[in-house]
Amino acid sequence: MTRSQTQPQRHGPVRVWTLSTGPLQENAVLVAGEQNEGFLFDPGDEADKVLAWVKASGVAVRGILLTHAHFDHIGAVQPVREALKVPVYLHPADLPIYQLGAASAARWNLPFIQPGPPEHAITQGQTFSAGDLTLTAREVPGHAPGHVVFVDQSSGFVVAGDTLFRGGIGRTDLPGGDHAQLLAGISGELMSLPDTTTVYPGHGPATTIGFERRSNPFLQ
């Protein structure tokens, strides 16, 4: 499990912060360029903690980008979007999962605020810009039908959600999961990145494409 990362990791002009939230220790991620504009990814729980973290960073958040819609990645979306007054982006294939967030959390007896509908869809190859920061969405379904990752190839990192972990991959035994599809997406969209690319996953510590290529048992 990762601890809250109060100091950002630098990738050239871009800074990346991570914050573990909630009982499932989901990683919210904050990314900003030199102009201090950026995006918030997967605010999963503990909205007050997320908002304090964003405020401390000084980043002007231009939108909430969701890698996918499992409840542990969207639990703070509604209060955070209201406080920051920003739109929410989600791949349409994950909308049914998004709408079932409260029901899913209830199975684990976890408190949950069901977020209102996302304002915008995410599509393959779509770019997201804030100031001098630009990220590109790539579809990597399998853990969830509408799972996407966000790549900054020039700065050398990817916000990967629950696709690729240090030593593991996303589980595929949940509704809409597909193991072969996930492996194909990791191969095509993530393993095509340079070995030096840093991977910020939805749970656990950061890793690199090269480390996972060499040692991840699921990719051998």
Image (cartoon, rainbow, N blue to C red):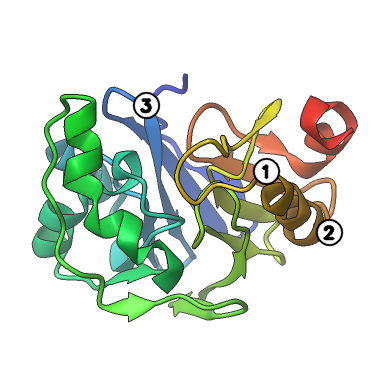
Image position, residue 138 (x, y; %): 62, 67
Residues 2 and 102: in front is 102
Question: Which amino acid type corresponds to the residue marked 3 in the rendered image?
Answer: Gln
Q: Which residue is mark 3?
A: 25
Contact between marks 1 and 3 (CB within 8 A): the answer is: no
Q: Nearer the viewer, mark 1 or mark 3?
A: 1
Identify the residue at image location x=84%, y=46%.
195
Identify the residue at image location x=78%, y=31%.
218
Q: Which residue is mark 2?
A: 192
What SS does tag 1 mark?
helix
> In terms of sequence position, does the residue under pointer 3 or pointer 2 come before the other?
3
Image position, residue 185 (x, y; %): 72, 57
Q: Above or below — where is 85 with respect to 45?
A: below
Residues 135 and 99: in front is 99
Q: Is residue 6 visible?
A: no
Instruction: Look at the image and tell me in which quarter the C terminus lies.
Output: top right
Count residues near mark 1 (Cα–Cα under 10 Å), then give few for <14, some for 14-19, many for 20+: some
